[in-house]
Amino acid sequence: MELDLKSLNVEQMPWLKKGQDWLIESGADFVVNIVVFVLILIVGRFIIKGLVKLTRKMLSRSNRVTETLQHFVLSVVSKLLWLVLLMVALPRLGIDIAPLIAGLGVTGFIVGFAFQETLGNLAAGLMLLLNAPFKIGDYIEAAGNAGTVKELNLMATTLTTPDNKKIVIPNSGIWGSSIVNYTANDTRRVDLTAGISYSADIGKAISVIAEKLKGIPQILEEPAPMIELLEMADSSVNFVVRPWTKTEDYWTVFFAANRAIKEGLDAAGIEIPFPQMDVHHHGTPPTS
């Protein structure tokens, strides 16, 4: 059956009459608004790309901005610019954005309350990235854990312990505690203790220890190693021995120096005492 368009009575179809009236009255304006809307999006897209590119260049020039932080900042900047662009363009289609803005505010409050711990980790991650108290590969101690930093993102930091355990710590726990970075500087001081008996020659012991330290190539000449009397303990006279070395040679020097000091004192005949107790008995033993 063919539809005879001429036989259609517009008066009998109110919706068609309304559509016809709207096209006559507002059709041209609507087409113009659509065109303007599309043009705003096209021009805005190029502007956003330019601003994001400019932001990337500015961030790249800063030595304190890590790659992770750079990606995050660029993502936030891009999304915010698109949001602003839509707020400018949507009114051209007759859309009232005031209720949308109000709805976003209420939604943001609800989401923030529900995910406050997650947002806390996010904020702490931003602070870590901005302040950079450590970087990937550093050996740190934080939140009661110590290890080498293997990964740092906006939510958590991953450490690997010397015995190869993996520890994932929420960033809020790290930023809320003291952070000790053992590898931040190029050099470190190695703190050792050596004890000799009370009957041993103090000057000779210092000379022996100093000579043995000279035989360890990883120990730096400047600052010079310090060897001083630390304390007169219960069973020994203790020296503090503090050589300096490059950070990567810390444990090499620690173990080598301990061994060298022990071997040197033994070779010189200087006794290294062990804890002992003298018991004195007074009185006459009972007779049977």
Image (cartoon, helix red, strand yellow):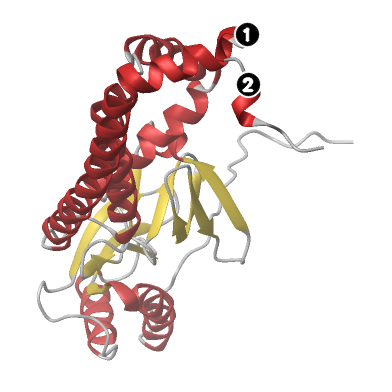
Question: In the image shown, does 278 or 85 lie closer to the viewer?
Answer: 85
Q: Which residue is mark 1?
A: 12
Label 1 secondary element: helix
Name the residue rendered at 26%, 82% in the picture: 213
Question: In the image shown, does 160 or 82 lie closer to the viewer?
Answer: 82
Q: Is residue 177 visible?
A: no
Please indicate whether residue 286 sits to the left or right of residue 49 in the image.
Answer: right
Relative to 197, is 157 above or below?
above
Question: In the image shown, does 14 or 288 lie closer to the viewer?
Answer: 14
Question: In the image shown, does 224 or 108 lie closer to the viewer?
Answer: 108
Relative to 238, is 6 above or below?
above
Residue type at mark 2: give it: Leu
Relative to 45, is 92 above or below?
above
Please indicate whether residue 38 sits to the left or right of residue 161 in the image.
Answer: left
Task: Kindly identify which numbered label has been placed on residue 8.
Answer: 2
**Label 1, residues with CA under 10 Å away: few <14, some 14-19, many ≥20:** few
Quarter of the figure with the N terminus: top right
Task: Kindly identify which numbered label has been placed on residue 244.
Answer: none
Please indicate whether residue 73 sits to the left or right of residue 143 in the image.
Answer: left
**Residues marked 1 and 2 touching at CB (< 8 Å):** yes
Label 2 secondary element: loop
The x, y position of residue 165, in whole percent, is 63, 60
The x, y position of residue 76, in whole percent, is 31, 41
Quarter of the figure with the C terminus: top right
Residue type at mark 1: give it: Gln
The x, y position of residue 16, in whole percent, is 55, 17
Q: Quadrant of residue 172?
A: top left
Q: Quadrant of residue 226?
A: bottom left
